[in-house]
Image: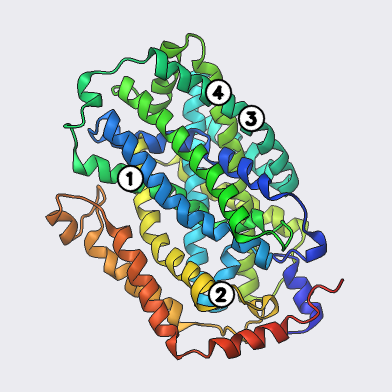
Amino acid sequence: MSERSFIEARSIDYVPLKERHGKVWHLWPVWFVGDAHLATIATGAVGIALGGNLLWTTIAVLIGSALGTFFMAFHSTQGPQLGLPQMIQSRPQFGYVGALLVWGVALVTYIGFNAFNQLLAADTLTTLWGYDRNTTMPIVAIIAALLAVVGYDWIHRIQRILAFILIAGLAVMTFAVATSAHFTPVQLDPGAFKPIPFLVQLFAAASYQLAWSIYVSDYSRYLPRDVGVAPSFWWTALGAYIGGSWTMLVGTVAAAMFPALKLTPALQAAADQLLPGSGKPLLIASLLGLVTITTLNFYGASLTLLSVADSLKPIKATVGKRVGTIVLSLVLSVSISLSASKDFVAAFDEFLAILLYLFTPWTAINLVDFYWVRRGHYSVREIFNPNGLYGRWNWRGLLGYGVGFLAMVPFFSTSSWQGPIAKMLGGADVAMLVGLPVSALVYVFACRSMDIEGEIRKATIADEGLDPA
């Protein structure tokens, strides 16, 4: 691949060393605020909606968030090492063209989450001021899309400010719950354990956190290359886990206090009961967080669409192309939100389950390749070469994904379909626990025939002079 064509390609994705900036702790507010909003609150209400009690739903949220965050944060550490967005890094495992499989999954995530975010934002504005739902959805989407056009630095500035506002709001609510909340004995009864609501809530929380994996590197890639694995892991994990589990538990408590109300009215009613007059400020702060994460989704969708286009025919990124991909994402997400079901929690739970099935094989393959097979040694130049070191199709990654996904099918459990083993388990969904090891083991076994050391040497040679001082 010529130096000229590589420079044009890397303008879409690669961040040269001289353009790296920021501090590793900046990852904390990005992922704290990324989780501190209404969609996360909705995730915490899933178990209560299915009949679980407050105690066991809280435990499920804490365990599920930890499980999903663990894998998500390890993806974040790849950004400073390679300077590439997350999805581009899938080319060595799946091939230059084969990576389109996981990019399609990423686009489903970006656009699907934004459709739900717009629904939640509209419901919030209706609850607060009675605005028309169908009018506010596109307005919120347009505001978020405009912020995405402004770019990375503004997103970070806004989120650092919002992080401290949301911490204050969550701290006040937590104090109010600890000192003023009253629940029925059954809500706190350890003997009232119900396995299905517990497992659904646990894996809904895990799926929600794992879904961030597709773009954690989109933000960590701007950090200097000497940022180590441990700092980038912990700053990402702490921000995502604290923001995610804390915010989910707000939804858990609100749903337990007002199980007959829809999500946003229940949240406002719970806040007002615990601390009179706090309902509206809490909804407004959560709404602002929702807008910023919608912005991140538009930004990620834009990068992915440009990468898809570049895989089919090499292109040079321009402002016009970036704006065009953001507008396309905007139109798709608004179209879905305007036609979506009004039963938000049920539809959102189904969406999270599907994401978990789609992402589990990919996360296993991507992480085991980075940390075990290739040990972080890749050629950035060859990742952009359609006929290069990593090939157009990599059967090993595709086999690992396919076998892992098929192994999970009997364990699928959603409101519309249950696999035979899930039925035997009474509807319990443990597909993630099957898909992770199966996908990883199949991929590692398939890679046994590769000359890894030889490939690493070729990758090192290919990238000589990539970032001259």
Distance between the alpha carbons at the discs numbered 2 and 1: 31 Å
Give the side of residue 19 with respect to residue 43, left or right.
Answer: right
Residue type pointed to by label 2: Arg
Q: Residues within 10 Å of mark 1 (few under 14, many from 20)?
A: many
Q: Which residue is mark 2?
A: 375
Residue type pointed to by label 3: Phe
Which label is found at residue 164? 3
Indicate which disc, 1 or 3, sits on the residue closer to the N terminus: 3
Indicate which disc, 3 or 2, sits on the residue closer to the N terminus: 3
Indicate which disc, 4 or 3, sits on the residue closer to the N terminus: 3
- Badge 1 vs badge 3, beta-carbon distance below 8 Å: no
Q: Which residue is mark 1?
A: 202
Distance between the alpha carbons at the discs numbered 1 and 3: 28 Å
Q: Does residue 317 lie above or below 271 as drawn?
A: below
Q: Residues within 10 Å of mark 3 (few under 14, many from 20)?
A: some
Location of the N terminus by quadrant is bottom right
Residue type pointed to by label 4: Gly
Q: Secondary structure at mark 4?
A: helix
Which label is found at residue 135? none
Q: Give 439 or 115, whichever is nearer the viewer.
A: 439
Q: Between label 4 and label 2, give the one nearer the viewer.
A: 2
